[in-house]
Each structure stands twice: as structure tokens, then as C-alpha cells.
Amino acid sequence: MHLSGTVMIHDKAPNRSLLVVILAGATFRQGYDGIAGWTDDPQDGLRDITGAQLTETARDADFYHPLHLKKLYSKFATAGVEEINGHNCYALEATLPDGSVDKLYFDAASGLLLRLVGQRHDDTSATKVQEDFDDYKEVEGVKLPFTLQQVDEKAPFTIHIDELHHNVDLDDSEFAKPAAR
């Protein structure tokens, strides 16, 4: 299925995040205000995120995630060198506090993260997910991926980023769970 739409991601330090996806006229939103997580979509409506899904949402909302790897993972083990899209990568197995393991692939030449393989939870199950990061560009001195590809059991998707802005003034209320309709 080839769908095109708009994805807006707002992140605010230290741990606030809002994702808005608009596809075929339908709006899907997921937010985290530093304590609580929520989703709002046409099928399930507004609901709280709980359990393992909330833990993952909180971890993803860490604005300084790349700098906090030693805090987010309890153990690291080298897993050799593998090729990802023509790049030699150092593979690391990173153990999360719950005992699950993410596999991270860092480009041997640049040090940039090119792939992350781990689990993602929804309300009822866990799914193995592969996320690829590509087309890194420097924005105000920071290299960030402008292409994100995700492959899981449900449906693969690709996000191409057109614009990225730093230091945008975002009010904390933007990340709060909206009132029930």
C-alpha cells in the first residue's frame, strides 16, 4: 500500500514528545508529557498508554537519548561487524532494564546509528521492529537522519523529512493528553 501523508514530530527537553500522522484525511496522535502517555486515533479514540508500551514511549521521549545510552541500557556487548546498506557497521547488543535486547548498528566510518532492531509493544503484544536511519544531514551543527524506514510484522513504512527546526518554542500543554470528546 502506497500512502502519502504528513508526519509532525515535536520533541522538547528533557522528555516530552508529540507525534501527529495525517493519512488519507485521518489523524493519529501520540503524546508523552514527561509522566503520562496517550494515543488518539479514529479507530480506538483517546486512550492512555500503559505497561511496556509506556516504558518504550518514555524511553523514546528522552530528548538526549543518544547521550543517555549508558543510562537507558544496563549492559552492552559487541556483536561483531556487519554490513548495512554498503556500510561496515559495529553491532552492539544493548540490554534494557527488563532484560530484552536491542541490537544497534553504528557506521564504522562515521559513528552514526544506521539501524536499530528491537521490540515494540502495543496493547496486546510485542513485535520485532527494524528501524533504519539514512540520509544524515547537518542541521545547526547536529547530524540527523532525514530518512527513517521501519519494518515490522504489520506493514513497512518510510518517513522522508522535509524540514527540521531546532529551538522552537513549544508550550508544555502541547504534550498533555487532550480532553475527552
Image (spheres, helix red, strand yellow):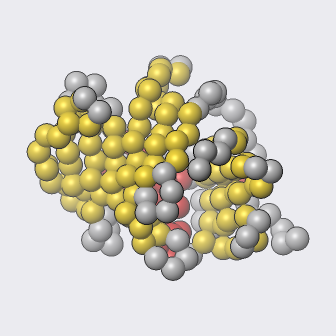
Please tell me which residue lies in front, 42 or 96: 42
Q: Would residue 169 be seen by someone viewing this image from the given angle? A: yes
Where is residue 11? Give x, y as percent: 61, 44
Does 91 sit left or right of 141 as displayed?
A: left
The C terminus, quarter of image: bottom right
Please tell me which residue lies in front, 4 or 66: 4
Identify the residue at horizontal 29%, vertical 33% (top origin): 85
When asked about the image quadrant of residue 108, the answer is top left
Identify the residue at horizontal 84%, vertical 68% (top origin): 179
Where is residue 15? Give x, y as percent: 56, 52
Does 62 sit left or right of 101 as displayed?
A: right
Where is residue 73? Give x, y as percent: 30, 58
Does 87 sit left or right of 58 as displayed?
A: left
Give the residue at the far front of this rendering. Answer: 1
Considering only vertical position in the picture, is 61 above or below 64?
below
Please tell me which residue lies in front, 100 or 41: 41
Identify the residue at horizontal 21%, vertical 59% (top origin): 75
Where is residue 117? Give x, y as percent: 33, 54
Identify the residue at horizontal 27%, vertical 63% (top origin): 101
Q: How many marks?
A: 0
Considering only vertical position in the picture, is 22 above or below 52?
above
When asked about the image quadrant of residue 110, the answer is top left
Q: Would residue 64 be seen by someone viewing this image from the given angle? A: no
When asked about the image quadrant of residue 123, the answer is bottom right
Give the residue at the far right of this rendering. Answer: 181
Please tell me which residue lies in front, 105 or 171: 105
